[in-house]
Amino acid sequence: MISQQLIRQEVRDWSKEVLETDKPVCPYAKKTWENNRVDVILSKCLHWTDLVDITKNFPTDKDVIIYCDTNMDLDMFTFDSRIAMLNAFVNSENLWVMGFHQQHDEKVVVDQEHFEPHFDESYNMVFMQKLDELNKASETLEKIGYYKDWDVKDFQDILKRRSKK
């Protein structure tokens, strides 16, 4: 069974091995972890009411909340609908939510074939961040050419997100 401590360790290891590589998928991940600005939360309910509570009181000492949902009965369509609905409400509160469902196609820039999960149970992840900080970081990355090899649609999604605030 997955515990809060085990899920945090696995997500941290995944970040090191997948996001923080030589050509990092997320250039800010390593520093954010090192500065203890990430919180990993194991879902406690089927309907994400605990996640909604976090949106009402986003911790000031964190830059990223990673919410791990072990409800594998939640299909991808419902998952994506929840993400869209959350963003419809929390963007005005300067928050952005994005999710990774087990059935999503892996992004071309994310190579995680070599990552070995710590346990057999699967889970979906929801990332929550301050919208203005996320946009500022992506503008900086754009200026240094970080997105030049990205899929056009994925980059357009980033530009669309920037218009939310």
Image: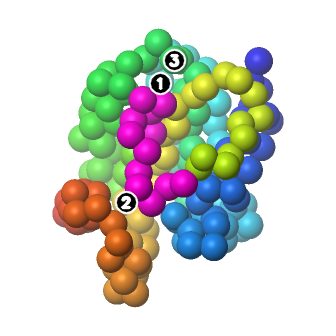
Contact, mark 2 vs mark 1 (Cβ under 8 Å): no
Do we see residue 85 in this rendering? Answer: yes
> Is residue 161 visible to the viewer in this orientation of the structure?
no
Give the mark nearer the N terminus: 1 vs 3: 1
The C terminus, quarter of image? bottom left
Q: Depth check: give the residue in front, 156 or 43.
A: 156
Q: Which residue is mark 1?
A: 48
Q: Indicate the amino acid at tag 1.
A: Trp
Whether residue 132 is situated above or below residue 70 in the rendered picture? below
The mark lying in front, picked from 3 and 2, is 3
Tell me the crowding category of disc 2: few under 14, some 14 to 19, or many 20 or more residues within 10 angstroms, Cα based: many
Marks 3 and 2 sit apart, C-alpha to C-alpha, by: 28 Å
Principal SS element in the magenta part?
loop
Q: Residues within 10 Å of mark 3 (few under 14, many from 20)?
A: few
Q: Quadrant of residue 18?
A: bottom right
The residue shown at (24%, 41%) is 88
| Left/right of residue 140 with respect to residue 87 in the rendered view | right
